[in-house]
Amino acid sequence: MPVSLKKIIFRVFSLAMLDDDGYYLLFWFQTVDLYEGQDPNAVLICLSSLARKSEKIFGKPGLGPKEAEGEKRAWTEEQLKAGQNVIGLQMGSNKGATASGINFGNTRHM
């Protein structure tokens, strides 16, 4: 649910302007990042993501790379069953270096 401001008050002092900006900049970056330069990277990330959305919504030219669109895939039942039989590398592997010869706390027996 978007937050709407009843009245925006323009002030001379940037410290007093922090109160006005807090409503709609709360979830993107902190106003301290913008006015005092605490985290300019967060400000740039927020502005570039906003520019990407503006290209899709408003049709205006965006800033930076275009937003990726997901590709819909239709899998057959045969392909889904074949994928269940594959053991992924996330399950682990018995190849490569292992820690089988390490004995913590024991002396080395020769």
Image (cartoon, rainbow, N blue to C red):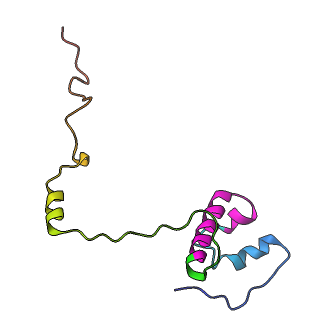
Q: Which is nearer the eye, 64 or 22?
A: 64
**Residue 39 appears anywhere in the view:** no
In the rendered view, tell whether residue 99 sits above or below residue 51. above
Which residue is at the far right? Answer: 12
Residue drawn at x 15%, y 68% as measured from the top left: 77
Residue 28's spot in the image, x, y percent?
59, 69
Please state if 94 lies on the left or on the right of 6 as rendered: left
Question: The C terminus is located in which quarter?
Answer: top left
Q: Is residue 90 left or right of residue 18?
A: left
Quadrant for residue 105, please give it. Answer: top left
Q: Is residue 78 above or below residue 106?
A: below
Residue visible at 63% across and 79% down in the picture: 23
Task: Determine which quarter of the picture holds residue 37.
Answer: bottom right
Q: Is residue 101 magenta?
A: no
Q: Give the total number of marks visible in the rendering.
A: 0
Q: Nearer the viewer, residue 46 or 18?
A: 46
The vertical placement of 52 against 95, above or below, is: below
Q: Is residue 7 visible?
A: yes
Write the residue at 22% across / 42% down.
Answer: 92
Which one is nearer the viewer's eye here, 94 or 27?
94
**View extreme (top): residue:** 110
**Is residue 51 in the magenta section?**
yes
Please tell me whether residue 74 is drawn above or below residue 2 in the rendered image.
Answer: above
Percent across and percent down for residue 72 are 34, 71
In this view, the residue farthest toward the bottom is: 6
Decide if residue 56 is on the left or right side of residue 107: right
Residue range in magenta is 31-55
Q: Position of residue 20 (x, y in %)?
A: 71, 79
| Magenta stretch: dominant secondary structure | helix
Q: Residue at x 68, y 68 (%)?
A: 31
Say which of 31 and 96 sits in front.
96
Left or right, residue 56 beside residue 97: right
